[in-house]
Image (spheres, rainbow, N blue to C red):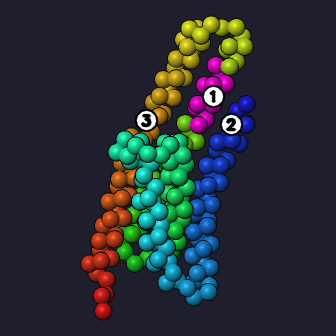
């Protein structure tokens, strides 16, 4: 049971995270190899637009908009954020021009890791509670006894659902750094 949970939850997390970092490094290397480094600038714009578009899920979740399935919008949020983050990492590349963009990229990587962690931890906890409930039902326990038996597991699961209280400030911090980076680009850009 424990091994299958690791395979179902930890391996995909590590794979997605390493694919994000490795894909960005490989794509940046490729752009350098073929002499098209300048394309990275546009990847930053496209990645920012994708990440901004992914927040339609948050608008739906907090009922600022009423349309769309929250489950489907969460999936769209996850895909757009991952692809947008990949594009921004390619945009950042291996260039070191200023600290602010690197801080923004670090905050973005932490926000992505936080989002992936929450996704997989919540899924794992939910499945573990459902499995334990099923085992206890097969043993013939009544629902009240099962609820008492699973009380602490359910409490921990409810606390884990609050991981968003950590994810949200990290994401907001990334957003602030990204905004400041974009603002400085417009201020210091050579408009000639």
Q: Is residue 90 above or below residue 149?
A: below
Q: Residue at x 60, y 78 (%)?
A: 29
Residue that badge 1 annotates? 128
Cα separation between marks 1 and 3: 18 Å
Position of residue 86 relative to residue 15, above or below, is below
| Mark 1 residue element | helix
Pick whichever of labels 1 and 2 is earlier in the sequence. 2
Residue 162, which numbered label? 3
Magenta stretch secondary structure, dominant: helix
Note whether 188 is above or below 152 in the view shown: below
**Secondary structure of the residue carrying numbered label 3:** helix
Q: Which residue is mark 2?
A: 5
The disc, 2 or 3, on the residue closer to the chain's N-terminal end is 2
**Was residue 131 drawn as part of the magenta stretch in this picture?**
yes
Q: Kindly indicate whether the residue at mark 2 contacts the one at mark 1 (C-beta within 8 angstroms).
A: yes
Residue interval drawn in magenta:
123-133
Which numbered disc flags the more N-terminal residue, 1 or 3? 1
CB within 8 Å, label 2 to label 3: no
């Amino acid at each position: 049971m424990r091994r299958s949970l690791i395979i179902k939850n930890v391996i995909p997390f590590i794979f997605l995270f390493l694919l994000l970092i490795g894909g960005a490094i490989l794509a940046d290397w490729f752009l350098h190899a073929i002499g098209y480094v300048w394309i990275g600038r546009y990847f930053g714009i496209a990645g920012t637009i994708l990440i901004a578009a992914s927040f339609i899920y948050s608008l739906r979740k907090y009922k600022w908009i009423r349309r769309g399935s929250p489950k489907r919008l969460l999936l769209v949020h996850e895909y757009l954020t991952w692809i947008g983050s990949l594009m921004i990492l390619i945009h950042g590349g291996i260039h070191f021009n200023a600290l602010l963009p690197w801080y923004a990229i670090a905050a973005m990587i932490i926000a992505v890791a936080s989002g992936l962690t929450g996704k997989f931890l919540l899924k794992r906890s939910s499945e573990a509670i459902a499995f334990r409930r099923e085992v206890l039902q097969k043993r013939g326990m009544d629902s009240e006894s099962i609820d008492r038996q699973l009380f602490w597991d359910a409490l921990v699961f409810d606390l884990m659902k609050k991981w968003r209280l950590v994810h949200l400030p990290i994401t907001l911090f990334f957003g602030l750094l990204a905004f400041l980076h974009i603002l400085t680009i417009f201020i210091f850009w050579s408009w000639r």
